[in-house]
Image (cartoon, helix red, strand yellow):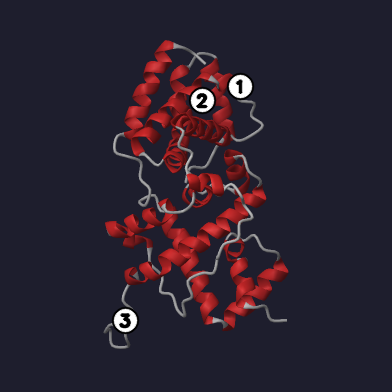
Amino acid sequence: MTVSNPEFEADCIRRILAGEKHLFHDLIRPSERGIYFLLLSLLRNEAEAEDAAQETAIKVYLNLKNFRGDSQFRTWVLSIARNEGLGRLRKMGTRREDSLDAEIDDQTGDYTPAILTSWREVPSETLERKELGAILRQAIEGLPEIYRNVVLLRDIEEMDVRETAAALGVTEGAVKVRLHRARAMLQRDLAPRLKGFAPERKGLFGWGA
Amino acid sequence: MRIDCKRVWEHISAYIDGDVDEGLRAEIDSHLETCEICSAVLDSTRNMVVLVADHRVFELPAGFSKRLHARLDKQLERAGP
């Protein structure tokens, strides 16, 4: 997680605008991951997302004097990234079906979780096994766009509700509802598949239970 | 009054984020003490939230940062903001 530092950012911006252009590298670095993954979520193509991320960074640089400081710098950057991504989707004429119908937030869906009677924790170290990461990525990529975007910013980039709402141009209430639904969908999809990754429970004499 | 499982599920995400008021939190806590199913649903959801937040799950493509800053350098040489 990259914590934003408004004082560093304000100082950096002032100096860049005064001519210390090279400082832009330091200013944009903490936002790189967020920019890329937001664009990947929208465009669903690595090469396109990378190119769009570069364009976004350039647009941020060229428009730096327009940053008012009334939102967090990263929020402003991510809204530029989102516009870049949406502009490309429009140009390609491929605003996908899932993004169209998913704009309706009050759609009824079954958000019943996977019912389990016990859960053994899968520790983070298990991610050393590449297939676990692949299963998690696949599940997130399979979410409809509006849910995927929110999971990406809230749970992966660990942005707060306000920042996420501002970056996506939706209300804070919508962020909470979407995150709830997304997590329920992920739990239902993943819980049965992740069970096999939990460490063996040792029996009384050190044998597997 | 005892709340039912469905009501607990409705608030699981907010509960994980610490975004439920005290009264509701107490109701959910007391439900969880005796409900194996809701405890497992909560634990598995929370576990999943922790796992997806790990930076090993979503890594930037190799060389992404280097290419980004190289392109920025070209722009920085050209024009100021």
For the residues labelled 1 and 3, the Cα–Cα distance comes to 60 Å
The relative height of residue A112 versus residue B61 in the rendered view (above or below) is below
Name the residue tied to disc 3: A202
Q: Amino acid at mark 3?
A: Lys
SS under mark 2: helix
The relative height of residue A11 versus residue A107 in the rendered view (above or below) is above
Q: Circle 3: is it few (<14), some (14-19), or many (20+) Cα within 10 Å?
A: few
Q: Earlier in the sequence, mark 2 or mark 1?
A: 2
Rendered residue at 54%/76% (across/down): B38
The relative height of residue B45 versus residue A115 in the rendered view (above or below) is above
Residue furthest to the bottom = A204
Residue furthest to the top = B78
Q: Position of residue A139 (x, y in %)?
A: 40, 57
For the residues labelled 3 and 2, the Cα–Cα distance comes to 54 Å
**Label ID, residue A66:** 1
**Label ID, residue A60:** 2
Query: In this rendering, which labeled residue sits more in front, label 3 or label 2?
Result: 2
Q: Amino acid at mark 2?
A: Val
Q: Position of residue A127 (x, y in %)?
A: 33, 58
Query: In this rendering, which labeled residue sits more in front, label 1 or label 3?
Result: 1
Q: Position of residue A23 (x, y in %)?
A: 46, 23
Q: Is residue A41 visible?
A: yes
Rendered residue at 50%/22% (across/down): A61
Check the residue under mark 3 and report the chain it is in.
A
Q: Earlier in the sequence, mark 1 or mark 3?
A: 1
Label pair 2/1, CB-CB below 8 angstroms: no
Left or right, B22 with respect to A135, comes to: right
Left or right, A181 with respect to B53, comes to: right
User: Between B12 and A206, which is closer to the camera in this rendering?
Assistant: B12
Rendered residue at 47%/65% (across/down): A187
